[in-house]
Image (cartoon, rainbow, N blue to C red):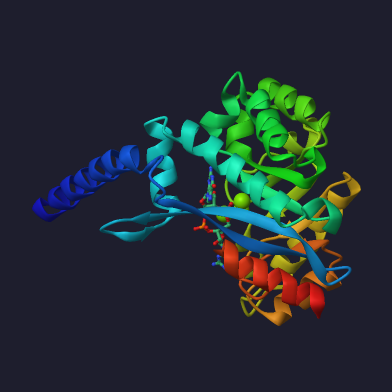
Amino acid sequence: MQRFHHAMADEHQRRRELTRDLQSAVGTGQFELFYQPIISLWRSELSGFEALIRWRHPQRGLVSPVQFIPLAEESRLILPLGEWILRRACGQAVEWKFEQRGLSMSVNVSALQFEQRDFVQSVQMALERSGLPGHCLTLELTESMVLRDIGLAGRHIRQLKESGVRFALDDFGAGYSSLSVLQSLPLDHLKMDRSFLQACRRPDSKRPRLVLETLVSMAQRLGLTVIAEGVETAEQGELLRHFGCDSAQGYFFGRPQPADEASSWMFTAAGS
Ligand code: C2E
Ligand code: MG
Ligand code: MG
Ligand code: MG
């Protein structure tokens, strides 16, 4: 019990320190975007990248977004940070000539950011400033965040869709999924949580496979493109192709990598 209290106190302390450090990290170049390729399975070619934030903490080294994004939300630092992420990702997409290449940049949006009254304007501003056309930007939302206020979510999505921006439902099936989100929101892509693929690896994977196959066809009948997350092996890629899944993302195709590596990766992939 004593030990447990110590562990709790340590955790509390760690969170406090990280939050404090976050404050000074915003605006001092400690953040960096990594880029992970998204592959179209039909054409076996690149369809875009997902931007994933990394924090190079001066003492702790790389801190995972799983650790600091929740702290950034609690302290509202996610608002300036989120704007920086959007600007950076759009700027990179212009630099990499996404429009000419027919590629899209996917950016994760946090709940607090999405709920802001000026969210639509801040995205439009990032597009205008960078010169990226809206159809080259995909925003990734999660079910829990759109369910907080589905009316607001619908309005924000519809307004941005007028500028061509696309929307993906991230981590679909990871939590208490609600099919009502699919009924009511005009989404473009469904990103299937990697737990579905993991379940297909179990020895008796008949049911998980059926679930996966059914999900793919349901999403497609709703007019959504399905992107499978967490593809780590060639077999998983094959399985997805077999089930008619549209796109995939995972270590098998490419890890999240710093901009310079992602860029040389893209040029070799395009040249091959
Ligand atoms: P996510 O948006 O679902 O991103 C996918 C996560 O899966 C990434 O973790 C990625 O590195 C990891 N991943 C990709 N392929 C594989 C694979 O084959 N196997 C396994 N095991 N994992 C794979 P990461 O970069 O640590 O990000 C974690 C989460 O943090 C993201 O989940 C997203 O929710 C959040 N996040 C990351 N960057 C941002 C950001 O810029 N803004 C916001 N608001 N959230 C972000
Ligand atoms: Mg994502
Ligand atoms: Mg995801
Ligand atoms: Mg995830």
- Residue 256 visible in the picture: no
Is residue 102 found left or right of 28 in the rendered image? right
Q: Quadrant of residue 60?
A: bottom left
Question: Measured from the top left, where is residue 190 in percent x and y?
Answer: 74, 49
Q: Quadrant of residue 12?
A: top left
Q: Nearer the viewer, residue 183 or 111?
A: 111
Q: Nearer the viewer, residue 177 or 7?
A: 7
Q: Nearer the viewer, residue 44 or 163?
A: 163
- The residue lying at 82 percent from left, 51 percent from top is 99
Which residue extends farthest top?
Answer: 117
Question: Measured from the top left, where is residue 211 in percent x and y?
Answer: 74, 60
- The residue lying at 81 percent from left, 31 percent from top is 163
Question: Measured from the top left, where is residue 105 in percent x and y?
Answer: 71, 51
Whether 237 is drawn above or below 13: the answer is below
Is residue 128 found left or right of 254 in the rendered image? right
Q: Quadrant of residue 3?
A: bottom left
Whether 104 is drawn above or below 115: the answer is below
Question: Measured from the top left, where is residue 82 in percent x and y?
Answer: 53, 37
- The residue lying at 41 percent from left, 40 percent from top is 27
- Residue 219 visible in the picture: yes
- The residue lying at 71 percent from left, 75 percent from top is 236
Badge count: 0
Report the quarter where the C terminus lies: bottom right
